[in-house]
């Protein structure tokens, strides 16, 4: 949350240069406060596990967040009961005419399928298009990030010869961005995917900014210059055991998966995994929710034209 200070206090310029969020008395006096309304489109097979992971991150902020869960279709899920889906999830027609402060679209186990061959691709495109008019900021995770970059900007991913699975070191490529406040120069994040985006194509696109990347895993955080779309190529929401669970599942299915890199103690799958990304994941979601949702969204969600512009020097 911001520190409220007197107008024109000399310390303001110093603090802002250090990436500390401060707010003038005048700006604070004109702020209205209400709960943030966030919609989650959950495409992962184990709905309850993913719900819990994302809600844990959203709940680790000082903001009150009202969450709606959205499903892509009303078909029965292999890993989640139909009763759970009917009780807690909404269909798109129920939210089509609503506006939201934030939208999170999760990854999906579709990494080796061409986008146009995904059975609900047209529906995904429809929701992405809808979000550009009805949501202040959208957080796309893993597969959803690739899908949105393809649909919105015409940038396609490259399929990998083997699954990119593990915990990788990333570096900041930009300095004074609100999304990166509190980030170390290097930090870790988990990846689990069969494709990756071309970093140079992302950097060359006039509407996109690469904020963090990895020598091993490529681009990680990409932000649209409009600040509406945040693309995260990995899984900051994953819990300590998630990569192990995926590895064990693939072994049980006879797929001969590679051991997730930099994850198990000594890279030995018989030993315990090491979680080294939780603080980063929490900070990423907290910064997104604070700076790109709360600080930008209009108080009256019925009027999305009322988005609050940031001062140019902050961006």
Image (tube, helix red, strand yellow):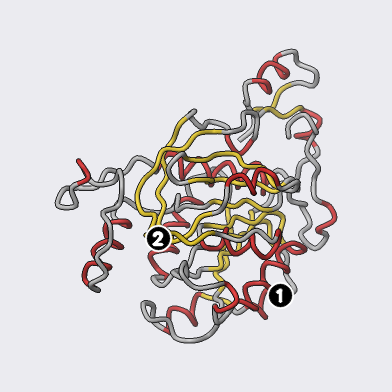
Residue for badge 1: 96
Figure quadrant of the N terminus = top right
Q: From the viewer's side, name the closer residue of 264 and 100.
A: 264
Quadrant containing the C terminus is top right
Q: Is residue 75 left or right of residue 243?
A: right
In the picture of the structure, the residue carrying the numbered disc 2 is 161
Which residue is drawn at the image coordinates 36% and 45% (left, top)?
Answer: 167
Looking at the image, do the residues carrying marks 1 and 2 touch, with CB atoms under 8 Å apart? Answer: no
Quick check: 241 left or right of 35?
left
Q: Position of residue 161 (x, y in %)?
A: 40, 60
Residue 303 image point, x, y percent = 83, 60
In this rendering, would 63 be left or right of 134? left
Q: Residue at x 76, y 52 (%)?
A: 299
Of residue 230 and residue 278, the one placed in the foreground of this image is 230
Query: Could you tell me residue 208's position as x and y percent?
Result: 69, 47
Q: Please, which residue is most extreme toward the bottom here? A: 75
In this rendering, the answer to whether 22 lies above or below 59 is above
In this view of the protein, which residue sits in the foreground, 240 or 52? Answer: 240
Closer to the camera in the image, 282 or 186 = 186
Residue lying at the far front of the rendered structure: 161
Q: Residue furthest top?
A: 10
Q: Percent position (x, y) of residue 187?
A: 44, 35
Tell me the tag on residue 263.
none
Pointer 2: residues within 10 angstroms few (<14), some, or many (20+)?
few
Q: Residue at 39% across / 70% down in the picture?
A: 46
Sequence-earlier tag: 1 or 2: 1
| Circle 2 SS class | strand
Q: Does 240 appear above or below 68?
A: above
Q: Is residue 186 above or below residue 192?
A: above
Question: Residue at the location (67% across, 53% down)?
Answer: 229
Residue 69 placement: quadrant = bottom right
| Spatial CA span between label 1 and label 2 | 39 Å
């Amino acid at each position: 949350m911001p520190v409220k200070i007197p107008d024109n206090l000399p310390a303001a310029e110093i603090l802002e240069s250090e990436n500390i969020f401060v707010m003038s008395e005048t700006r604070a006096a004109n702020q209205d406060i209400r709960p943030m309304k966030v919609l989650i489109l959950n495409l992962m097979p184990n709905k309850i596990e993913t719900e819990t992971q994302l809600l844990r991150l959203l709940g680790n902020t000082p903001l009150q967040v009202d969450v709606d869960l959205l499903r892509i279709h009303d078909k029965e899920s292999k890993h989640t009961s139909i009763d759970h889906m009917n009780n807690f999830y909404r269909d798109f027609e129920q939210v089509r005419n609503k506006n939201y402060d934030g939208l999170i679209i999760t990854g999906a186990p579709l990494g080796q399928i061409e986008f146009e061959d995904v059975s609900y691709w047209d529906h995904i495109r429809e929701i992405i298009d809808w979000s550009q008019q009805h949501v202040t900021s959208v957080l796309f995770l893993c597969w959803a990030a690739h899908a949105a970059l393809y649909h919105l900007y015409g940038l396609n991913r490259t399929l990998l010869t083997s699954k990119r699975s593990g915990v990788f070191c990333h570096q900041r490529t930009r300095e004074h961005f609100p999304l990166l406040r509190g980030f170390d120069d290097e930090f870790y994040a988990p990846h689990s995917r069969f494709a990756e985006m071309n970093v140079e194509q992302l950097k060359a696109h006039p509407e996109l900014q690469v904020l963090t990347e990895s020598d091993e895993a490529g681009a990680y955080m990409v932000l649209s210059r409009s600040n509406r779309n945040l693309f995260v190529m990995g899984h900051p929401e994953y819990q300590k055991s998630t990569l192990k669970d995926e590895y064990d599942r693939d072994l049980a299915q006879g797929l001969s998966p590679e051991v997730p890199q930099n994850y198990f103690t000594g890279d030995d799958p018989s030993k315990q995994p090491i979680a080294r990304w939780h603080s980063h994941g929490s900070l990423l979601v907290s910064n997104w929710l604070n700076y790109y949702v709360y600080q930008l969204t209009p108080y009256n969600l019925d009027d999305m034209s009322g988005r609050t512009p940031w001062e140019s020097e902050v961006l």
